[in-house]
Structure formats: structure tokens, C-alpha cells
Image (tube, grey):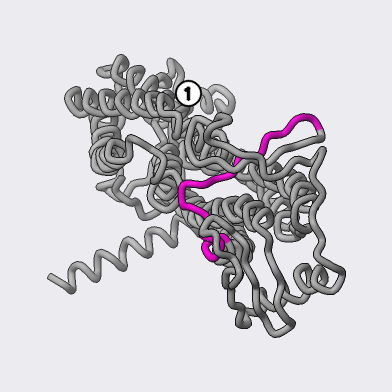
Amino acid sequence: MSRNAGTNLKAKARAVVARITRNRLTFVFFLFGFTHCFAQGIIQSFLFTIDSEYSAFFTSITKAANIPNVNHTDLIVSGRDYRLDMCNYIPHNDNTCSHIFDSTTDVVEVVGPDQNAKLRGALVKEMRARQNLTLQAFPEAQNPNDNSVILNATYGAVAFSKKCTSILLYPQQHMENSRREDLAFVLLQFWLFGISIMAMIYDSVPHVLAGLGARVLITAWSSYALWRSYWQQKVYYAMIESPNSPYEIIDLVLNCTALTISCYLSFTLLKLYNTQSFNYMGAPKKIVRIQRLEVFVLLVASGLWVDQLFNTYIRYITDWFELFVAIFIFVTIALVPWMITGWYGIRHEHRVATGVFIVLGFLFFSGSCIMFYSQVYRWTYYAWPNMGCFTTASILLFLASFVLGLLCRLNFGKGLSQYLHAEAALASSNFAPEVFEHDVEKDKTYMEELTQRRPQEQPLPTYYAVALPTLSR
């Protein structure tokens, strides 16, 4: 039994290798996906490491200052001016928020050139070098609400005032979200590489389109992230210190280059697959294969929201914590049946399975829209653009899959099952459909056309191809 399993595994591995290396285009597409995944993984890992270090540093200060867990910041921008508020509840109003910084009136306090240099230079470098730092409250501070902190290090001690520690809550929350974004994009690179391989194995047009669409979104987000870094630089410079963002520039350049190469390779593959995969047996053009790009997008959007729900101030200010957890559990459990019923029901024209797929898709879409009834959810959507982008994309993709599911259901009985049956018969005979070079349903066959063009010559066989190993779908 184990020997047969090993033999089958080796046969499938050889089939995958044959599909990837069958021509120069597919091999270059594979090398491009692997190289880009590796390079982007390294860049995002660097970003994750830096954001994690700064996040841990700011978190240690805010915790030492005894800032309550429910507190969070709201940056209000008005033209070139901005105001930073500290709030402890949602919705924000004068009773739940207090001003801690205003660019039109406040000036950052400087405690002296020596201590200022220590704070902005030596101490930050020491923190980045992972040397020992200790934080403690002022010994003379008797008020429990006093957020003053002393930072002790090799270079000496630096005092953080109450106002300073309150301001540091803003970059602490920003760095925490950046760390989550970096992790999501690391996983996204592996997902992109995976669907690229699936596209080559199954000659799948939807997988190619999904990968190309994802790269467009990633490049757009990289452009926004670079702009955001420079905008945040102005805010940090006024309140704290000027940061640098070299990795965001590298990330954007790499994504732009990858998008250009991916467009060329993807459109070339699309021409090949559209010619070789969809026209052999006369598959109905109205049948649309639903590519589940929304699966990864939904998982990321749900993961980011749940992380906010469990690990940030959102947990302490929401009145619907149990309901949000229940919704997440339902989505997690129902996601797998939704995927299976969508693939099986539409592919095999199974009415019950397709109905379940459509109903679950409608529930997912409706639930995503109903979530905006919560003020806490709306605030998180507004305050964290990365989660907002993934949430918006998941809602649009749910709507698209729901509409396409209905269209596929309306087109049942128009030839898809016969096409798939013929395709399966060819695959079981190890006979690749690439051997067909003409449409057998035309009034004039290719043989007749060839005879008319060359009446004095004996017609030759019009098809020849090396049958590639096939994989069951």
C-alpha cells in the first residue's frame, strides 16, 4: 500500500515538473514567481523585524507609563495642520477625548541638547542593537495618573513627560498595525507563488488572472505605503523624530518591476491557454470559472480584524465582543463548505450544491455589510487603511462570486457537463487536448480546407503533439 502511494506521488511529481518545464514560457513564469516570492519575502521580513522592534520599544514605554488599555489616539487633519486626541471610547466626542497635541499651538518640549541627543540618537541606536534598557516611573510621582517615565541606559537616563508618553501611543499603535501588515504580505507572496504553479499545472486562465490582479493590488498598496511613510514622517518630525523608510522604496520598485514582467508573461499565457483550453470541445462561453481570489482576501481581512479584536484596545471598548467572535467562528467553519460546494456544484452542474454555494455567498456578503452597523468596526475600518482595503476587496469579490454563481446556475444544461466528460475521457487515456488544432463542429473541416488549398497533394495529418502527463482536477 505504501509502495503504491509512493509510486503515485512520484508520478504526480513528474507530471508537475513536466507541466512546468514543457516550454520556455512556463519555465520562465515559474522562475519569475519563485524569484519574486523569495525577494519580496526577504524585504517584508526586514520590514516586519524593524516594525516589531519599534513597536516593542514604544509599547514598553506606554506600559511603564500606565496608559490604560482602552486609550487610543485619533489624528485629525485639517489642511496642513493636525491635532492628536487621546480617546477612551467610541464614538469620539468632547467627553471621551482630550487634546494632547496641536500643530498650530504646541511646541515639542526639548529638555536640553545633551539629553535630547541621547534620546534621539544614542538611546535609539542602543535599543536597535538590543542592549539593555530599563523603564520606571518617576520616584517622586505620587499621582497614579501621572504618566511620567524615566528611561535608563548605558548612556544615562532620559525623562519622558506625561505629554510625551501620551504622544508615543500614536506611533506605538501605528507600528503594531504595520507589523500585522508585514506579516500579511509575507503570507501573500507564498499564496501568489502557489496559484502561479496551479495556473501552469491546470492551464488555468482564472488562476493567471487572479495572480495578475493580486499583483496590481499589491503594487497600488506599495505606492500608498510609500506616500504614507513620507506623510507620517512629517507628523513624527513635529511630535517625536524623523523616521526613514528605505525598505518601502525597495518594496515599491520591486513590485513595479514584478508587475511589468507579470503583465507580459500573464498575457502571453492567457493567449496560449485561451487557444488550447477553452476551444477544443466547444465549451460554452457563458460558463465562467470562479477563481477564489476572495478566499485569501477574506482570510486576511478576518485575521486582521480578529487580531484587532483580541489584542488591541478594541476589545475593551466594544459592546459586541461575543457576537464578533461568533461571526468569525461561523465564517471560519462555513468557508470550507462554501469552497467545496462552489467548485463541485458548478463543475458538475449539481443544483443542490450550487444552491448552498449561492446561499452561503449571500450570507457572507450580507454579513460583511451588516458589520458596518458597529461603530467600533467602522472606526477600525477608517483608522487602519490596510484592513479597510482587504475588507473592501473581500466584499466586492463576494458580490462578484454571488453574481457569477447565479449566472452559472442559469446556464446549467448548456454543454459544460459533456465538455468535462470528454475532457476526463481524454485525460484517462493520457491523451492531451493540445493535439486538436481545429474545431470539429465547423461546417468545413480543416482537412477539407487543406484539400481545397492543395488539390494535387495528399492531405497530411493535421495534428501532432507530445502528450503531457495529466493531473486530475
Q: Nearer the viewer, residue 77 or 47?
A: 77
Residue 290 in the image: state x and y as whole percent: 39, 31
- Determine the residue positioned at 77% across, 48% down: 230
Q: Is residue 161 above or below residue 170?
A: below
**Which of 18 and 372 lies nearest the eye of the viewer?**
372
Give the position of the C terminus as an image quadrant.
top left
Where are the magenta residues, as a range?
Answer: 62-79
Q: Picture quarter containing residue 106? A: top right
Q: Position of residue 324 (x, y in %)?
A: 32, 38
Q: Is residue 166 magenta?
A: no
Write the residue at 39% across / 22% down: 404
- Please, which residue is most extreme toward the left here? 1
In screen coordinates, is 109 left or right of 40? right
- Can residue 269 be seen by looking at this rendering? no
Q: Residue 13, percent across and down?
A: 36, 64
What residue appears at the point 71 percent right and 38 percent down from the top-left corner? 83
Image quadrant in which you'd find residue 1: bottom left
What kind of residue is marked 1?
Glu
Q: Position of residue 250 (x, y in %)?
A: 73, 58
Disc 1 element: helix
Looking at the picture, tell me which residue is in the foreground, 102 or 342. 102
Would you call the spot at circle 1 few (<14 residues within 10 Å), some (14-19), or many (20 or more)?
A: few
Q: Which residue is mark 1?
A: 448
Left/right placement of residue 268 relative to residue 294 reads right
Q: Left or right: where does residue 104 sit relative to residue 76?
A: right
